[in-house]
Amino acid sequence: MRKPVFVMLTLVSISAFAQPEMPKMVPEMTEIWDPEVTVVTPGESPMDAPSDAIVLIGEGKELGYEWTNASGEKPGWDFENGVATVKRGAGIIQTKRQFKDFQLHVEWRTPAEVVGESQGRGNSGVFLQGIYEVQVLDNYNNRTYRNGQAGSIYKQHAPLVNACKAPGVWQTYDIIYTAPRFNNDGTYFTPPRVTVIHNGVLVQNNMVVRGPTEYIGIPEYSVKPHGDGPIILQDHGNPVSFRNIWIREL
Amino acid sequence: MRKPVFVMLTLVSISAFAQPEMPKMVPEMTEIWDPEVTVVTPGESPMDAPSDAIVLIGEGKELGYEWTNASGEKPGWDFENGVATVKRGAGIIQTKRQFKDFQLHVEWRTPAEVVGESQGRGNSGVFLQGIYEVQVLDNYNNRTYRNGQAGSIYKQHAPLVNACKAPGVWQTYDIIYTAPRFNNDGTYFTPPRVTVIHNGVLVQNNMVVRGPTEYIGIPEYSVKPHGDGPIILQDHGNPVSFRNIWIREL
Amino acid sequence: MRKPVFVMLTLVSISAFAQPEMPKMVPEMTEIWDPEVTVVTPGESPMDAPSDAIVLIGEGKELGYEWTNASGEKPGWDFENGVATVKRGAGIIQTKRQFKDFQLHVEWRTPAEVVGESQGRGNSGVFLQGIYEVQVLDNYNNRTYRNGQAGSIYKQHAPLVNACKAPGVWQTYDIIYTAPRFNNDGTYFTPPRVTVIHNGVLVQNNMVVRGPTEYIGIPEYSVKPHGDGPIILQDHGNPVSFRNIWIREL
Amino acid sequence: MRKPVFVMLTLVSISAFAQPEMPKMVPEMTEIWDPEVTVVTPGESPMDAPSDAIVLIGEGKELGYEWTNASGEKPGWDFENGVATVKRGAGIIQTKRQFKDFQLHVEWRTPAEVVGESQGRGNSGVFLQGIYEVQVLDNYNNRTYRNGQAGSIYKQHAPLVNACKAPGVWQTYDIIYTAPRFNNDGTYFTPPRVTVIHNGVLVQNNMVVRGPTEYIGIPEYSVKPHGDGPIILQDHGNPVSFRNIWIREL
């Protein structure tokens, strides 16, 4: 008769191998109350600075309050009604403050009058920690190398899509930046990471930055340890404008 | 005489240890042109659907066009002028389409008339792939457990800050979701990752999701392999409203 | 005649869209000579300490030279011919030195005479930075919970396979440990990561450690920032032996 | 009288903000028993093949059983007593089997008689999935470019240290390889990752492979989607020998 044998084997099997029943948890075991999450008052629209942001370029704030030129002096760019515009030959402008990880909102506009082509049209850039460039360019009906167009991590990562607006129209970048951490030997322990949303469209999704965004050469070869750094806006000779720039340290 | 000795040592040193001079690269060596980046026309504001988005809830589109209830039938929620509102007892609504990696824009509003407290006030949720919940809750002057408040990955990650607007005011979520990939044994090869921007404020920064967002128990213990999944909006008994929901597959 | 038209279109297409030919690189452009890689003399077998290792337990080195008990005093374990054995009641032993990232070689042996079952048989543990336990257990024909057996990150990750040798036989762990880095709020910026090779068989593959390896509760809930930490060997009441332990700081 | 007021405020504060006491968990809530972990019998030493390994080169197994040359024909290398030696001009040998993620043990020996220098001395290589090379080279007192020496991911990552043994002495590589996963557009969703232990010394720690290990050019530029691939051993013209090669699929 097989049945009893089967039953006995089953019993043995249960005692030797089966998982003991796990005691039931209750909902409160996974509810954490402290510390209370800090309240931040958001702007009226998602483009407006929230209460914990530092406004870098905005109405009613002199450009020289937060920015200098490359020599640490008053920036030579045009500035009117909260709009800063590249002045050819005045060079870059950089924030006096230094940042590590951050969320950054930038609004930019290339000239309504189209001049030049490829990299020569509406070219500027936003340098994160002063080293890693998110390209600003007029790529509305303007072909250039894919890893150098608007929304690219310059010469490293092309944007996922080309979400450019027309020349003369204000555009937005929402950037989430995670600074690199370094090994003792000067290499990255964790590389920089960048998310970019261009005019509401995701163009960089937590991308690994390979190294400084060099015009010539291989990014990995110029990695050097660094601490916090400024935001730098580039003077590439084209009168690109910027407004409503705010940053939140993370 | 020391100079000749010095010269000889230098020569030895060069031949044995020095790096040969690297030939110089030229800029064009790091310029990639093909394939051309796809053009997407952004919305007028970053909150408006870009040209490649699927509008899930919007004006002029019947709710039943993209959504069903849990039984695959016409959703029972109220819907007027592009605004869908939870109808208590009608249950969840879910998209007919299934998604993998995506960018998702959601606008939501908790009732202007405040009723209840903690988890009982303006409670709903956005389930990514039908499994992973980004909590919707009225946390404007309403304390609850930190890992269960608005902007949390429910019971896993509290939001970085509390960026809630007042009851009755429209709020936005911009969500970037990377679906998990699985090992052959059913564990995550890479876990889900979620970025959430709440009213323009970063509240989840590419956070690792530990597993399904369970009300009771440990997320890791309920991981199971899955393919693409729908967006689900929760009926938690409170008349929370939704509008202007669009998604872009990545 | 279509052919000329075709040719003309092709020319247009080339000038408007085609990738300019990239200049050719030469091999030397990707050859980096400096700094010279540091020479380390490996052991005769891969189990033997290389020249840059610190020998923590070995022949001809008193146990008290590198280790103390929990009170910072001379360890009470038995020690003979380079073999240290848990002495019930003497408590844990810990290194005087503190470590961050490291490669660790451990040899261990459970008692030849089998006593007890499940967690009661040949139980000890190797605590990385004093906090994260790689379980030591006699799991040769001894079933226990999978996330608590030999080679597990205790109560977090079961080993990929059970590579145990018989009781009384020496076994090896080769462990690669990457310490966590912390955010300012005390959470992990990067969690600890552990690779374990057990008797030559990979059992943990760069696994993410969720938090301290607690006997009771959820690891994530007990994460606290910490600096370098010691190696700790556990006294779980069973006379488990250890020999040939060496470590290389990374 | 302020004191009573203070007391009352404290009470209010407690009821409004304090974390409710979390119910206590019990140990069994984090003990998972099923499924049972698969048993693998390890080799006698960590260098010996465990029971679930495929022996690719070993005693008593003809070389042509697991390997072919580049044309899919019988490999032309010398093979005697389980030792395969590069035969100049016979070209590479590759496994008939294709692999994804794996643990690989390789023993290799450069010629006892030293001939040539830099890349010309004892040069061969182990190609993972046929694409990604871990360099084999006699770097015992032989300087070459750091990212091309023994234990390097060729032209991408120098080894952490130089752990070479002398010419004519058998050396070991223990390699843990995680294959890339791909996005729909042909880029890496997750890049390949490689850990290499050379003669018991960690030389690559879960390093990200940037792309195919090219002799000329930038690895990222030659990334193409691929499935499983063979192990390939290189013929670089030097009579390098191999023995005791085994692999475990992960």
Image (cartoon, coloured by chain):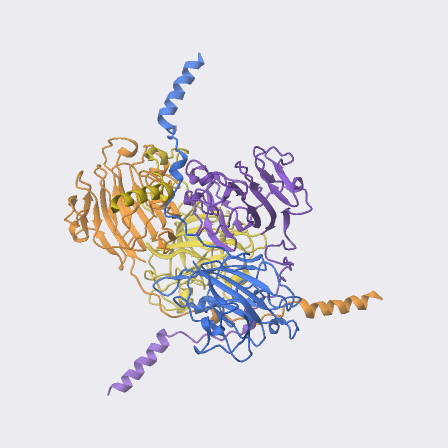
Chain colours: A purple, B blue, C yellow, D orange
Residue C141: name its quadrant.
Answer: bottom left
Residue D172: name its quadrant.
Answer: top left
Q: Is residue D207 above or below residue A5?
A: above
Determine if residue B98 is in view: yes
Q: Position of residue A17 (x, y in %)?
A: 36, 73
Toward the front, the furthest residue is C1
Q: Is residue B162 above or below residue C5?
A: below
Q: Position of residue D63 (x, y in %)?
A: 17, 49
Determine if residue A228 is in view: no
Residue placed most toward the observer, B128 or D94: B128
Q: Position of residue C44 (x, y in %)?
A: 32, 43
Image quadrant where one finds the N terminus of chain B? top left
Toward the top, the furthest residue is B1
Toward the right, the furthest residue is D1
Q: Position of residue A12 (x, y in %)?
A: 33, 78
Image quadrant where one finds the C terminus of chain B? bottom left
